[in-house]
Image (cartoon, helix red, strand yellow):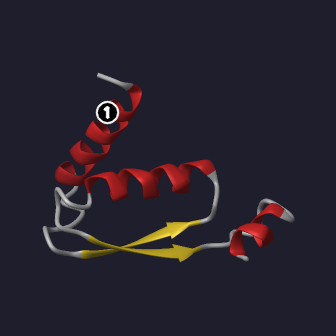
Amino acid sequence: MSYKEKIIAAVKTNIMEYNMFESGNTVVVGVSGGADSVVLLHCLNEIKEDYNLNLVVAHVNHKIRKGTAERDAE
């Protein structure tokens, strides 16, 4: 199993364990542009058809990464 497949499997496990959503839901993904939120978005995009999800992406500026965060927002 590739590293990508392991991450996707872990995401699916957590979704099921914590009953995060049901098939057909709309999920709003807060993305700051940092590695963790971008990976989350990629994972959810990979599995959206498995769960019949409608993904909505919302940019979140934590104002932590000076300069970079502003460029991400643009």
| Res 38 → quadrant | bottom right
Q: The disc labelled 1 sits on which kind of residue?
A: Glu
The spot of residue 17 in percent (x, y) is: 19, 49
The spot of residue 71 in percent (x, y) is: 78, 69
The spot of residue 51 in percent (x, y) is: 17, 61
Q: Residue furthest right?
A: 67
Residue sitting at 60 percent across and 48 percent down?
Answer: 35
Q: Residue furthest left?
A: 23
Q: Which residue is mark 1?
A: 5
| Relative side of 43 to 14, left or right | right
* Front residue (pair 9, 48): 48
| Relative side of 32 to 14, left or right | right
| Count of marks placed on residues | 1
Quadrant housing the C terminus: bottom right
| Relative side of 35 to 43, left or right | right
| Res 19 → quadrant | bottom left
| Relative side of 68 to 54, left or right | right
Residue sitting at 24 percent across and 46 percent down?
Answer: 12
Residue sitting at 69 percent across and 69 percent down?
Answer: 62
Residue sitting at 13 percent across and 68 percent down?
Answer: 23
